[in-house]
Amino acid sequence: MAIRTHYKEADIRRLLEAGMNNTQIARQLRITRETAAQVREELGYPLAPRSVPPTPQDKFTAATVEVDGGHMVWTGERTQDCSPVLSHSGTKLSVRPIAYEIQHGRKPAGRVKAACVYAWCVAPEHQADAVDRDRTRTQPRQLDAAAALLGAN
Ligand SMILES: [Zn+2]
């Protein structure tokens, strides 16, 4: 018994090999999704895994542009007061805590602000939370104390 195949079988096979799903194949070859699904089955290809939805981190990367000095400009959505936000699962997430988590691997404590010279910068490595800011504020005092000790000797 001959296996019935589609006249675009070679093209479909090529796209299946490339890991495309039925919708993508249908669009590319101007065939129906049903045909793509049918040929996939006939050729013995497994169902394409459902595409993984983008994480907030993926969305962050997609909406930032790196500029000179490693600073990053946010090109995505903003709130009315210009804070960068991104939509995720139907809610608006503040972008800076996401940037912070990318860099530090943990959620920030308190407000996250750019620690570099640009208030608009969203570069993950340039974000500081309340704890980081406290630390940089106390450091000069500790240095003063050390200097005073050295001076006393
Ligand atoms: Zn910066």
Image (tube, helix red, strand yellow):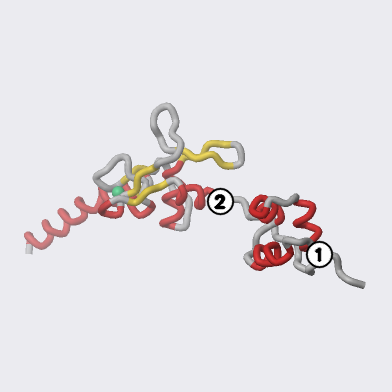
Q: Quickly name the residue at label 2.
A: 55
Note whether 27 is above or below 88 in the view shown. below
Q: Report the residue at 53% width, 36% height from top.
A: 92
Q: Could you say where residue 90 lies in the image, as x and y percent from the top left?
A: 60, 37
Between the residue at mark 2 and the residue at mark 1, the CA separation in whole angstroms equals: 39 Å
Q: Report the residue at 54% width, 39% height from top.
A: 87
Q: Quickly name the residue at label 1.
A: 5
Q: Can residue 40 be seen in this view?
A: yes
What's the mark number on residue 124?
Answer: none
Q: In this view, does 39 lie to the left or right of 153?
A: right
Note whether 117 is above or below 105 in the view shown. above
Tell me which amino acid carries mark 2.
Answer: Thr
Q: Could you say where residue 13 lies in the image, as x and y percent from the top left?
A: 70, 66
Q: Give the image quarter of residue 3.
A: bottom right
Note whether 64 is above or below 13 in the view shown. above
Q: In the depicted view, which residue is nearer to us: 139 or 42? A: 42
Q: Report the residue at 70% width, 62% height from top.
A: 12
Q: Is residue 132 visible?
A: no
Furthest toward the bottom, the residue is 1
Graded by Cα atoms within 10 Å as few (under 14), some (14 to 19) or many (20 or more), the crowding at tag 2 reads few
Tell me which amino acid carries mark 1.
Answer: Thr
Furthest toward the front, the residue is 7
Furthest toward the top, the residue is 80
- Tell me the SS state at disc 2: loop
Q: Give the image quarter of residue 75.
A: top left
Graded by Cα atoms within 10 Å as few (under 14), some (14 to 19) or many (20 or more), the crowding at tag 1 reads few
